[in-house]
Amino acid sequence: MNWLDSWDRQQEVYIRDRERRYDVMLAFLEELAPAEPLVLDLAAGPGSTAVRVLDRLPGARCLAVDVDPVLQRLGRDAYGDAGGRLTWIRADLRDPEWPSALGAGRVDAVVSTTALHWLRPEELAPLYRTLRELLAESGGPFLNGDHFPFPRETPRIRAAAQRVDQRRQDDAVAAGADDWAAWWEALRADPDLAAEHAARAGLWPEDGRGFASASLAFHQAALDTAGFTESAIVWQDLDERVLLALP
Ligand SMILES: C[S@@+](CC[C@H](N)C(=O)[O-])C[C@H]1O[C@@H](n2cnc3c(N)ncnc32)[C@H](O)[C@@H]1O
């Protein structure tokens, strides 16, 4: 079983145009990051964004940060250190000390995909302050491709978008992709990953995590407060968006 191929198919259940989203993010990265950048992939999982950065920008190096030992093991097994260009760092972004694990006080760009909606608003605000500090010297971009729900003030639009999204998910599963639960269930049966599964247990509450509690308005206000001077949506499909912020 190629777990990373099936990871990509599983993620596409939720983000139909995931590769298009990457294409836009990488185009802005090329445009706004300095040559041969050091790029931080936040909540990198198995390195999905990091490896696309390395493919697209031949001079780039990436730091792939995530707390999940299972996904990091899959990424490490598949890509290793990518010829010295990829560093895997296990850290929890909820821990204020996480930047000390980076081994770098500055980076040239920060990217993240489908991940920061796992953080609560009170966890995002300090994270953005840290990113602003990491980007202070380079002035490079922060590109966050994620699920930013439509506001509750537009309830019919929000509900219609959810229905369209659900139909897309149902179609993708009917066409043979695993959804999140099915993918993890299959992976748990792999005995080679038993130690990582044990280390993963308890990282998050089992009963759902209140995802996507932060609105787009909150994200932009928090970026502003952290000292980013511009932020804007540069790509969108339903409530999947790419938010670009500049120091
Ligand atoms: C849906 S996956 C996305 C992974 C990858 N960025 C991608 O797009 O394929 C969400 C990732 O966020 C990571 N994550 C969530 N909360 C985190 C935290 N507090 N610290 C570090 N990583 C976190 C999870 O471990 C998981 O790998």
Image (spheres, grey):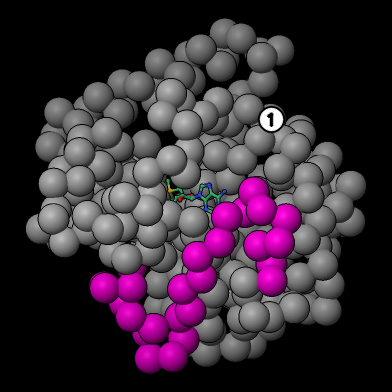
User: Is 99 one of the magenta-colored residues?
Assistant: yes
* Residue 172 position within the rendered picture, expressed as x and y whole percent measured from the top left: 22, 34
Residue in the image at 12% along x and 37% along y:
176
The residue located at (47%, 44%) in the rendering is 203
Quarter location, residue 170: top left
Q: Nearer the viewer, residue 185 or 213?
A: 185
Is 122 drawn above or below residue 91 in the view shown? above
Which quadrant does the N terminus fall into? Answer: bottom left
Considering every residue shown, the one lying at the far top of the view is 156
Q: What's the amino acid at mark 1?
A: Ser
Which residue lies at the image location 43% right of the left edge and 23% below the top edge? Answer: 207
The x and y percentages for residue 168 are 31, 28
Q: Nearer the viewer, residue 52 or 4?
A: 4
From this viewpoint, is residue 8 visible? no
Q: Which of the 4 image quarters holds residue 131?
A: bottom right
Which residue is pictured at 41% across the width and 29% down the height?
Answer: 206
